[in-house]
Amino acid sequence: MTDNTVAGHGEQPGRALAGLLRNWWESSARDGREKPTQQSLAKRLGIDQTTLSRYLNPAHASNAPSRIVEQLHSALRAPADDLDRALALARAAAAAGKRPATPGASAAPAGPSADRDTAARRRGRSPVAYPALAVASLLLLALGGFVWWLVPTTTGQSDAKGMAGVSDRPSEGTDWPLARKGNVLWKARTVQLLLRANGLDVKVDADYGPATATAVKKFQAAHGLTPDGKVGKDTWPLLVVTVDSRTTEPDAVTALQYLLHHAGVPTDSTGTYTPSTMRSLKEFQESRNLPVTGVGDEATWRALLNAQGPDQHK
């Protein structure tokens, strides 16, 4: 399917997407409900209002990612039939944005001096400022060394302990998120797919309702956990499935592909671990400073879950 086919008769997919999202927003005031302000809607989506305004402006091409499109569709209660078309437009707009720039631009002069001048211009500095900056840097280094020589070093041991305490703190976004009854979209869908991968018959409807909570309790009880129906730091490590080229469980692979796609790494949802899935997974692992193995291990699942959007509730 070409971009023009998706957008409709040659219309740019980004503009078509912006028009559709705008229509969702304008039409949300129905059945006694008021249309949400862009400020309140942006806060709910976890983005700034300027970005949301750009997504909703048909005069400009929208590059709203699939995750935002799904959240807008849910928040604005847009027609169910619109979601597939909106996601297709979002993929087409993303693909169009990755095309290489038109050739023919004048090339910059080659050589170390030219490289240095180009870098200086990119930072908004004039090339002639480099000698002055170099002199100032040398003076600061000399002054710093002099001050260090004057300061007593008897506190070095306690300072080292203090620094060690700081470095031992876990970095942000490394904890398992909490999924519970009432969640919709990515948390619910991921839990449901992984429950199915573990042999539990659950409907994948992206709605963490009573049936999903009951299945979670059954899984927890079978693994010696307190059956509270919530998926947190103790349940996730048992629920996730290691995914690699040998994985034949389609629901586990689908969950991994779904999270990759909504973490900003375009990935087809096929349920099969393809070479394309491996490339996407390695790209994500590299972006998160994880071992680039192409294997969906526990650390990778945790990073993928923390790379999703904000919670969505009914």
Image (spheres, rainbow, N blue to C red):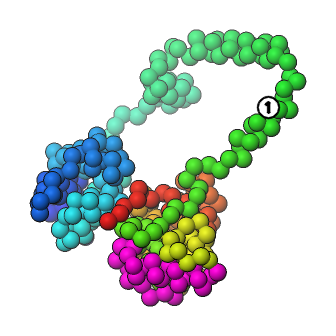
Is residue 263 toward the left or the right of residue 130 in the image?
A: left
State which quadrant residue 141 falls in: top right
Decide which of 211, 162 is in the foreground and name it.
211
* SS at circle 1: helix
Residue at horizontal 85 percent and vertical 18 percent from the top:
152
Where 193 sits versus 144, above or below? below
> Bounds of the magenta span?
199-224
Decide which of 118, 289 is in the foreground and name it.
289
Q: Position of residue 78 (x, y in %)?
A: 19, 64
Is residue 290 toward the left or the right of residue 75 in the image?
A: right
Q: Name the residue under label 1.
A: 159
What is the three-letter code of the residue carrying label 1? Asp
Q: Specify whether residue 168 is in view.
A: yes
State which quadrant residue 271 falls in: bottom left
Query: Is the C terminus in the top left, top right, bottom left or bottom right quadrant?
Result: bottom left
Q: Position of residue 232 (x, y in %)?
A: 55, 67
